[in-house]
Image (cartoon, helix red, strand yellow):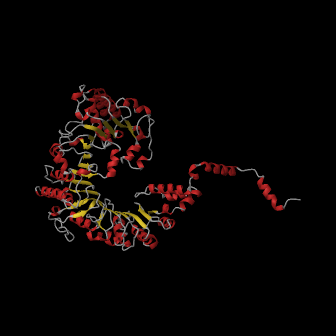
Amino acid sequence: MAPAAHDEPQDVIKDFPPTPLSLDLQNARTANGRIRILRLPTELVGEIFLLIVLEYIREDNQYGLPAALILASVCHHWRVIALAQPKLWAQVPLNYTLHRTKLFLKRSCSALLDLYMFKSTTHGRACVKEWFQDLAAILREPSVSTRIQKLVFRTQQCWVRHDRRRRLIQDHCAMTSRYLLPSLNNLDLPSLRHAILLEERTPSFSAPSSGTDLDPKFFLHCPNLRTLTMLGCRLRIPQAYTPLSSLRRLEITGREPSLHYEDILATLKMIPQLCALKIACDMKCDDDYAFDWMPDPDRTHFLPPGEIVCLLNLRELCICSSANAALFLLSRLIYSHDTRIKLEIYRGVDDEDEEWTCYKAALRFLIPPTFVERNEPLPNFVLALGGETVSITSLFEEHSDIATPDPHDSSEFDTRRIAIMETLRQRNLWETETGLESSIISERASPSTLLEHRRHYPPRHFTLTMFVEWHGEPFIEDILAPEIPDMSNIKLVVQTEHGEDDASSSDDSDDWDIESIIRRRERAKTRVHKWGAINDTLLPQSWGPVECLQIETYAIPGFVKTLLAIPDDPARVLPVIRDLRALDIRGIRHLERSHSIRVMEGLQRRTKVLGPLEHLCVEDEDVWYEVHDEGDLPIDTLRTCVIPGGLRIRTLYDALQEQELDWDASARYPKPPYPGAKW
């Protein structure tokens, strides 16, 4: 029986030879089946996508397309996975393309929203105020406002010429506090937990120099707000924080605005559940208003004189302001004994405090009296003497027996408070001008910081980080030695602002004289080496030996001179070099490569006289230039300078983990193939 007519085409198709296109498709399907990520469960791939989006959604966007759109455009399979993940689209970028914002809001379904406003240089041809109005209309929709859990608003830029006679950027148009937040007043935000408001300044910014006052009406219906960060703006009236009783973290930063410390005290009384406070603005006290041209402060909201504010839940306290205002604020606060304190204060330009009284007051406030009374050394304590700052980090969590008593028993707090007030009364307080002639930072680390600290160094030590310019200053012997008379297990970190005989320290490339540099190098090879930046005036004479030494960047040349000048008699070697157990050399990538050779010569000289170190950490500078030559870093020579197993090579990954680099600068983490070295 003859086959049916309609079966002929099927036989023809079956016998038709394969085309190159069909072979390519078949090979592609076979290859895709071998790709492991395509065989992962859909839920796991979705979680990977979410991690990618969270990594690349930054407050300062540098990419043309959001990560979610890129992932959804790779292939059909990935698009299906991306569209099935509402959380992927809940990270909403707020830029001038509002249709993209609406697309993200639609695809996020009912997921809670994180809104990020990136700094854009253009908003089309319209004024940025029109974009603010259109954006506010979208955010006011109940289907959107009730789902917002985090928002980041920041100043934009408006390039529209509002004045035909001048071609100036109208910065006042770009202020979110003036043209966006008022459009969102009285908005119901029941899910909002994190708010970041950034009023960034530009040179032509026309806002008042005292900072921008936010309208409290924006915060009237935010019952679950937990963190509030304000840069260049403020909630001026303390009563504005009344609806924010659930607030846990408050940050007021930026060179402006200025706030009276009494206003801050009144504010803190409105949010008694606060766990973290950061004040990094121009905080003032009554003495700052002593000049005729300074208007009197508004005392309407000041607390009664001497009233104490108790913050039992406070765990982090950071104050960066003038010395007198910071000390006055501390004298009116009571907090838990395990609070992490970071105090950065500075003396004014006209300050006549030649005896460093403000530093004494800060040290006495933060160091438990039991240490001085018992003449005990301070363990886990970090002191940093920078070019303009003195920083102190104290880790008291290990010693529960000497912790501050319960805040309800405020006898010790009263003693410290009275001591501070007496110190302030006995000296002429600072003038209104607050320069950075010198300052002090005091910090008590949290248990997590203490745990991170143990990963690199022994748990009990005193760390001193200092610029070599501080040696010989009266602070070392007149302030530090009396307040901390005994110290052992010291780790010393040495820095300096400028290198010696190093062309890379010059900011002007036109000043480089290649011939003079060569002549200096030749003289350096033949002249008698003298003691460099490391000398016996860096530390108080009563302190114990330095067990760990860390040398950074432009202090390396001076340190190398010290190593090369080591005498043959170990007894005559400088104690800071002789008693070393661990040495860490960082920042050599910023110097000329010839310094690497001299570092090796110095290490060999020290090993010859004093023997090998227990721990040695150096950088492979070629890693930073992405041109690795295994012969440039003599690992075999380095191993002779340290006991077996004590060598560590720093890489980009290490610098990233230690927050020395940002993520963009460390996109690659090469690890040189040095067997047996620690990473």
Question: Farthest residue in the bottom direction?
Answer: 186
Q: Nearer the viewer, residue 278 or 582?
A: 582
Measured as percent of width and height from the top left, residue 515 is found at 31, 33
Measured as percent of width and height from the top left, residue 5 is found at 83, 61
Residue at (26, 54) in percent of width and height? 342
Q: Is residue 115 visible?
A: yes
The N terminus is located in which quarter? bottom right
Residue at (24, 49) in percent of width and height? 392
Which quadrant of the view contains residue 129? bottom left
Question: Farthest residue in the front direction?
Answer: 401
User: Relative to 249, is 437 above or below?
Assistant: above
Please indicate whether residue 473 sits to the left or right of residue 462 in the image: left
Question: Farthest residue in the right direction?
Answer: 1
Question: Farthest residue in the left direction?
Answer: 426
Measured as percent of width and height from the top left, residue 219 is found at 34, 70
Q: Nearer the viewer, residue 56 or 50?
A: 50
Measured as percent of width and height from the top left, residue 529 is found at 25, 29
User: Relative to 534, is 196 above or below?
Assistant: below
Please indicate whether residue 632 sits to the left or right of residue 373 in the image: right
Q: Is residue 123 visible?
A: no
Q: Nearer the viewer, residue 461 or 81?
A: 461
Which quadrant of the view contains residue 616? top left
User: Relative to 128, is 540 above or below?
Assistant: above
Count of picture labels:
0
The C terminus is located in which quarter? top left
Which quadrant of the view contains residue 41? bottom right
